[in-house]
Amino acid sequence: MTDVAQSFAATFVDELAAHGVEFACVSPGSRSAPVAMALQRHPRIKVIVHIDERCGSFFAVGLGKATGKPALVLTTSGTAAAELHAAVVEASYSRTPLIVVTADRPPELQGVGANQAIDQQHLFGSAVRWFVDPGVPVEMPNAARVWRRLAARAVAEAESGPVHVNLPFREPLVPPPGQVPTAEAAPAQSMTGGRLLPNQAQVASLASALQRSQRPLLVAGEIREGERLAPALHRLGLPLLAEPTSQLRRSEAGAVVESYEALLRAGWSLQHGPDLVIRIGATPTSRVMNRWLAAAAAPTFLIDPDRAWRDEDHVATNVMVCDPQPLLEALPVPDRSAWREQWVSAGKRATAAIAATMVSTPMHEGHVVRALSSRMPDPGQVFIGSSMPIRAADSFWPLARPQQRFFGNRGASGIDGLVSTGLGVATGRDAVPTVLLLGDLSLYHDMNGLWALQRHGIRATLVVCDNNGGGVFNFLPQAEHLDVFEEIFATPLGLDLSQVARLYGLVYSPVSDRSGLEPAIADAIAAPTPTMVVVRFKREDSVNGHRLCWEAAASALKG
């Protein structure tokens, strides 16, 4: 007779698969054996093993970002479960689907000093959308219905962020050899979801503001499925400041302004302030933009379907909780062609000036971004690391091609787990080439994540900006405190990254001058073996190179 724990696990996993769960990131452990074995044996779920639980959890976050569906991450009890916390926080703040399943000791082993038993109740606090501990599986009437509903609800609750299912098990944890548990049958659980449509008052309010406005401006931060908004934005024909992870920095979205960071840094922007701002998506990455928008003090409509109040400068005058697509589609189309042309033309002039200047400036992150953008396939996808890479992409990536997509961990914006998240993205959309654009500190912080490349045959290329430390701090006031700066802020690693590549079976491709950038990136993307392109430059050169680009753009805008 099959143990009830085995029946529960098989039934629970089967219902997860029925609701579209395709991937499970599993770290080895004894207490989680019933669920791990059920996952491995299920024909519709791909199990991806990770020795490091933190790597596995961030990998699952990447899968969720790429597919829009929750991946499952499974650990045993104890500190293994605690390792997931950082990834849960990122998933929560980026609204990424994720199902966290932690095995646990039964109640009689809690609080009595039992091995590997910690308090896992509400382990992740407010970071999860839903927490449940159904107790040790027991035989009961309608058990299959109860177990299947548990799985169905986990998938439903995970639509906009992580859920935590804590499962205590008693021994025995595995069935006798040769016995394979089967899922208990029960009527299928049906789930339907939807988007929150705008009401007439919301449409009328924004439409009225738009008709009165002479200088309206669209701003797009990171948006999941942002590309579906492109036709509506194109129809409006308003100047659009879109960062790459919005999926809207493309001609299909209409009047996209190139090099807007340069415009906002120049005096030009002071004479071209908006009298209406329509914001969609997450808070923009650019501090310069956020400060400029705050100073503009224009009426600001924040379209926020997640009720997240992403308005750190407290400038939003209207927060609209609804799906942005039907709201934008319902708006009138004002003729603001002259205003639009001012922004679009200025962006093109700034872009040309920056490109001309970069021919002679010291190599910095901008060169890496421009080289990658010119060689990135279409379709293709880029996972952009935090700190300097995401800022460089925001400043220097030109208009994207139609089927290029951009991802990043912009929920909590940490440098932890970036390798694993990027490889999760690559696995979730494995039909297209994937490039991870990272800094050397981010690579080091999640070096264990590279193990998955060879273990699971993942197709991906790494492009690493190696400035021997935390380059972003050179742009901050901390850089002026020379007596402590290098030791506690810049934190130079002094690592030979070729040894990292060798350890994890990657081809190592070093680049130290501008002429070698594009060929190295092109060869790496085309290579059959995962390749790490490492671009070496000095942090001081990065600061000077950025300054020269901004000065060139400002000069061009005066002419």
Image (cartoon, rainbow, N blue to C red):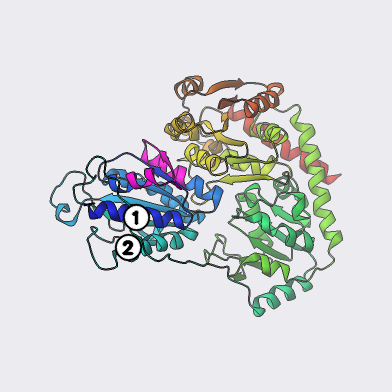
Q: Mark 1 belongs to which amino acid? A: Ala
Q: Label 2 is placed on what type of residue? A: Ala
**Residue 175 in the figure: left or right of residue 520:** left
Residue occupying image coordinates x 73% and y 56%: 240
- Element at label 1: loop
Q: Which mark is residue 183?
A: 1
2 and 1 marks in contact (CB < 8 Å): yes
Which residue sits at x=78%, y=71%?
332
Looking at marks 2 and 1 on the same chain, the residue that comes earlier in the sequence is marked by: 2
Residue 238 in sight in this render: no
> Does any portion of residue 33 appear in the rendered image?
yes
Q: Is residue 243 magenta?
A: no
Name the disc covering residue 144, or none.
2
- Drawn side of residue 495 relative to residue 121, left or right: right
Residue 528 drawn at (x, y percent): 59, 25
User: Is 264 placed left or right of 33 in the picture?
Assistant: right
Q: Position of residue 412 (x, y in %)?
A: 48, 50
**In the image shown, does 510 or 58 lie closer to the viewer?**
58
Residue 141: name its quadrant: bottom left
**In this picture, is 248 found above or below 462?**
below
Mark 2 lies on a secondary structure that is: helix
Dot 1: few (<14), some (14–19), or many (≥20) neighbours within 10 Å? Answer: some
Residue at the bottom extreme of this rendering: 201
Mark 2 Cα-neighbour bin, 10 Å: few <14, some 14–19, many ≥20? many
Q: Which residues are magenta?
A: 37-60
Separation of residues labelled 2 and 1 (CA atoms): 8 Å
